[in-house]
């Protein structure tokens, strides 16, 4: 893993949170993206070398809706950048981690992503993401 690519934060109202985080970080989101497969709207802020991703559920089946129901708003996941998501998944499986995704899938912001189950990472939901070649 080569860096913290972003930190994902679950929010109830992304419009309001975009305004809040724009004030907090003193930068506007550089993109807002609907990820229908995940049932979320996301927005991204650049903060130096890393990013903040806000996530709002668009339906009650979304994992973000379930997370907020259980734990409330707040830090949802940490995403690490990797050069090759498929190789990293294999390395993690070899090392005994429980992968939610065994193969990389399309994520927001032009990334191939996979999640590691929090039960194998001290309850920290962990994402790996590879920048897709453009
Ligand atoms: Zn993420």
Image: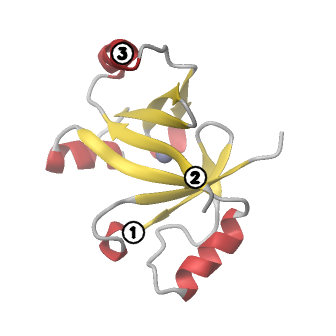
Q: Residue furthest right?
A: 134
Q: Disc 3 versus disc 1: distance between alpha carbons?
A: 29 Å
Tag 1 secondary structure: loop
Pick the quarter of the image with the N terminus. bottom right
Residue located at (45% from left, 79% from top): 97
Find residue 117 and name its label.
1
Q: Mark 2 or mark 3, which is nearer the start of the sequence?
A: 2
Q: Residue at x 63, y 68 (%)?
A: 103
Q: Compared with residue 28, is residue 94 higher up or lower down, i.e. above or below? A: below
Labelled pair 2, 1 in contact (Cβ < 8 Å): no
Give the crowd class for mark 2: few <14, some 14-19, many >=20 residues within 10 Å: few
The location of residue 113, given as percent across then percent down, is 60, 55
- Quarter placement of the C terminus: top right
Mark 3 near mark 1, Cβ–Cβ under 8 Å?
Answer: no
The local crowd at label 3, few if under 14, some if 14 to 19, many if 20 or more residues have their Cα within 10 Å, is: few
For mark 3, give the secondary structure.
helix
Q: Which residue is mark 3?
A: 15
Q: Residue at x 43, y 40 (%)?
A: 39
- Disc 2: which residue: 3
Dividing the picture into quadrants, the one containing residue 60 is: top left
Between the C-alphas of marks 2 and 1, the distance is 19 Å
């Amino acid at each position: 893993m080569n860096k913290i690519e972003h930190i994902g934060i679950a929010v109830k109202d992304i419009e309001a949170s975009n305004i809040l985080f724009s004030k907090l970080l003193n930068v506007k989101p550089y993109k807002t993206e609907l990820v229908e497969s995940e049932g979320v709207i996301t927005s991204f802020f650049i903060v130096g070398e890393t990013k903040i991703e806000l996530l709002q559920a668009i339906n009650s089946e979304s994992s973000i809706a379930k997370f907020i129901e259980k734990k409330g708003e707040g830090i949802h996941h940490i995403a690490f950048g990797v050069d090759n998501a498929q190789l990293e998944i294999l390395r993690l499986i070899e090392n005994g981690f429980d992968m939610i995704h065994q193969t990389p899938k399309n994520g927001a912001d032009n990334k191939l992503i996979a999640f590691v189950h929090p039960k194998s990472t001290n309850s920290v939901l962990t994402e790996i993401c590879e920048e897709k070649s453009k």
